[in-house]
């Protein structure tokens, strides 16, 4: 489960859990904006992934560039979403039994193995310039 769907499920079902007074997620101030940002990041990644699969299926030369774009974008977005999820829950989010710190560790490696994010940037810049 992504950090986003975890947060949405937890707080749309039990919004009073957050500060004990809000009755909707929208009532939780800047958290609503965090959730919107996570939603946009998730959609961006979904479309990038579909695009590279579509290009690859057609043996399009652009698929090479987009493979690196996707390998760069998805881990970075997932790390951002999980960090925000932990911030939203404060110290509670950091606790091992909540599962988010484990999820962050699992996601963090995806920006390292199979070519680090910096190596993806090198690959993309070689294609661009
Ligand atoms: C949990 C885990 C599982 C793994 N599983 C596998 C696996 O199944 N198969 C496998 O083959 N490997 C696996 N690896 C290895 C992984 O692919 C490498 O750790 C990864 O490629 C980074 O290489 P490195 O650790 O040697 O770091 P380095 O290459 O030493 O890089 C260190 C830092 O320098 C940066 N850097 C290096 N070169 C450049 C450059 N030219 N320009 C800009 N920045 C640069 C990197 O981005 C990184 O930030 C795994 C690693 C871990 C931690």
Image (tube, rainbow, N blue to C red):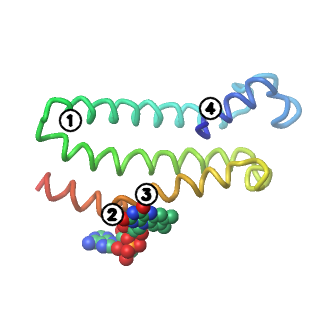
Q: Of the residues under marks 4 and 1, which one precedes in the sequence?
A: 4
Report, in whole angstroms, how far the alpha carbon at label 4 lies from the one at label 3: 21 Å
Viewport quadrant of the C terminus: bottom left
Residue 20 appears anywhere in the view: yes
**Label number found at residue 56:** 1
Q: Earlier in the sequence, mark 4 or mark 3?
A: 4
**Nearer-the-camera pick, 40 or 54:** 54
Q: Position of residue 88 (x, y in %)?
A: 70, 44
Point out which mark residue 111 bears: 3
Foreground disc of the pair 2, 3: 3
In the rendered structure, are the residues bearing label 4 and label 3 in contact, judged by CB atoms less than 8 Å apart? no
Residue identifier under label 2: 118
Q: Earlier in the sequence, mark 3 or mark 1?
A: 1
CB contact under 8 Å: marks 2 and 3: no
Observer able to see residue 112: no
Label 4 and label 1: CA atoms lie apart by 29 Å
Dot 1 or dot 2, earlier in sequence: 1
Tell me which corner region of the image, top left, top right, bottom left or bottom right, holds residue 121: bottom left
Q: In terms of image quadrants, where is residue 22?
A: top right
Mark 2 closeness class: few <14, some 14–19, many ≥20 residues within 10 Å: few
The quarter of the image that holds ligand 1 is: bottom left
Q: Is residue 129 left or right of residue 31?
A: left
The residue that disc 4 covers is 5
- Neighbor class of circle 3 (other Cα within 10 Å; few <14, some 14-19, many 20+) is many
Q: Secondary structure at mark 1?
A: helix
Residue at image coords 72%, 27%: 25
Ligand 1 lies under 8 Å from the Cβ of mark 4: no
Q: Residue at x 52, y 36 (%)?
A: 37
């Amino acid at each position: 489960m992504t950090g986003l769907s975890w947060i949405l499920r937890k707080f749309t079902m039990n919004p009073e859990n957050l500060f004990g007074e809000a009755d909707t997620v929208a009532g939780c101030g800047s958290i609503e904006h965090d959730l919107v940002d996570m939603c946009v990041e998730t959609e961006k990644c979904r479309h990038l992934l579909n695009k590279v699969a579509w290009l690859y299926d057609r043996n399009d030369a652009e698929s090479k560039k987009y493979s690196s774009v996707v390998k760069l974008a998805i881990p970075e977005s997932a790390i951002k979403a999980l960090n925000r999820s932990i911030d939203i829950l404060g110290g509670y989010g950091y606790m091992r039994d909540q599962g988010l710190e484990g999820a962050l560790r699992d996601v963090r490696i995806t920006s390292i193995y199979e070519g680090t994010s910096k190596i993806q940037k090198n690959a993309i810049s070689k294609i661009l310039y």
